Image (cartoon, grey):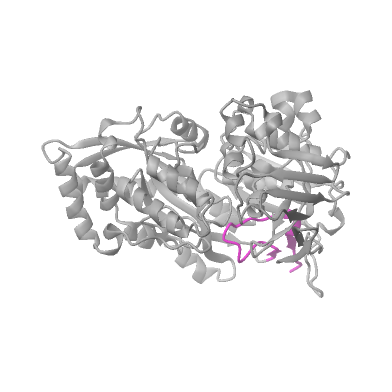
Amino acid sequence: MKFRTTLASSALALSLAFQAQAADVPEGVTLAEDQNYTFWLLDAIKSMDPQINTDVEGSDVLRNLFEGLYNEDGNGELVPGVALEHEVSEDGKTYTFKLRDDAKWSNGEPVTANDFVYSWRRLADPATASEYAWYMELMQVENAPEIIAGNTSPEELGIRAVDDHTLEVKITTPLPYFPQMLVHGSTFPVLQSAVEEHGDDWTDAGTLVGNGAYKLVEHQLGERVVMEKSDTYWDAENVVMEKLTALTINDVNQALTRYLAGELDRVDIPAGQYPRLKEEYPEQAVSTPYNCSYIYMLNVGEKGPEALKDARVRKALAYTIDRDIIVDRILQGGQKPSYNWTHWAIADFERPELDWADNMDQAQRVEKAKELMAEAGYGPDKPLDLTLQYNTSEDHKKIAIAASQMLKQINVNVTLDNYEWKIHTDRMQNQDYDMARYAWCGDYNEASTYLDLLTSYSGHNNGEFYNDAYDKLMKDSKTAEDPQPLYKEAESILAEEMPIIPIYHYANVDMIAEDIEGLPENNVNNTWYGKDLYRTAE
């Protein structure tokens, strides 16, 4: 759905035309009696707290338990959530949101503008220790940097409740994509009284109070998450799917077996199996572009190995990994080889020409890598020993084994280290690694969602890559009339400094039960909502 624009009282008013936001069941479709949806999670959900969660899988769950100002439809366009519409001042720095008056928490209390004020302040507050506090800064919310640094009170954040159903947000720089940033889970409201009454236990099943289309009824960490339709949700009468169940299965091959046995309605296809499954199950096996990039993050900070402080070594590692083998022989699911950070399908993005990617074949890259290693002092008589860490997954293991074999060509001996997700991410956050498997899924469809991550002020720059010129480009991009040339320059710096090793750009490679409808088909973010789903009768 597109914005419609009208001029009113010298302010630019932007509103989202209202329509039924839940499941849109075509006329003539017969619904199944069983309206339950069971989906797969690779890893345990670390936190059910919107201001604490950092995981894509956690976001998939939280999007059903909570609702922000806006949602996305199947094409990635904004549709109303708690906000029905907004107005933007002429200078683009003040947003005024009109909130619906029928939004309720699962305990029956009304959702108000003050709930967003409390939650956004909580996100920015250093006492919360959120890894996503920096998101307030990326959104350019007034006073966010000072609050995050601990120099200003959270009460000074540029957000206020004009009244119960009017929310005002002040940002320091006009951002054309600001509304798109509001679908991110860290901006979702939480109920202050529930947080304060129960402390860290407020997210437990039976205790969690949300404002989404579903309520949490069971959470067995590392096993299952069960959500049931919430009768207090403002559009409950149009929600068809009664129950959502997420099963955590660390082995993707086991997950596929359970899908084929009818225990799951959706699962990722294991590496290398898409061609076979597409032939056997043409209506169930799907592959579409997905706004995520797979990399090996390099620890270039003080705690990292001395060798990785040398850009020549970092480049040599990147040049030697053969992405075509990984994509065409291991994954085989429509993924694309990656020589840069930002996903190719991001709106308006065009990567710069990169000599190593565009003007060398793989044999030439390996020869150049050997030269760079020799310049850095490494060779047959002085090999380099590194550790590559990855989280539990057969696919990650296959890629890591392949990469370690490839790196032997340049006398790099790689020891593989496997940890379950929480330990893996904790070690990365503590810079307790050499190289680590990492993937970033964009928070919105704009290149800055990738490039901001590698700034010095990012909450996710776990490799501790700090570059003043890069920081300046990304800060300048916020006020540029056209930021795309600056994004190209930023990518060029990454190619020259190589703080990460790009591996591939994701595709969504799934098995989806034929009777499940309502999942997005043209949304590069793959943002889905249980309230949009329904199961058809056979």
Q: In this view, does 50 lie to the left or right of 97?
A: left
Front residue of 153/278: it is 153
The quadrant in which the C terminus is found is: bottom right
Q: Which residue is drawn at 70% across and 66% down?
A: 2
Task: Tell me the magenta residue range.
Answer: 515-538
Q: In this view, does 410 lie to the left or right of 445?
A: left
The image shows residue 376 at horizontal and vertical percentages of 18, 39
Q: Which residue is drawn at 20% across and 59% down?
A: 363
Query: Is residue 242 in view?
Result: no
Number of numbered callouts drawn: 0
446 falls in the magenta region: no
Q: In which quarter of the image is residue 465?
A: top left
Q: Quadrant of residue 366?
A: bottom left
Query: Is residue 120 in view?
Result: yes
Q: Which residue is drawn at 14% across and 41% down?
A: 379
520 falls in the magenta region: yes
Front residue of 93/238: it is 93
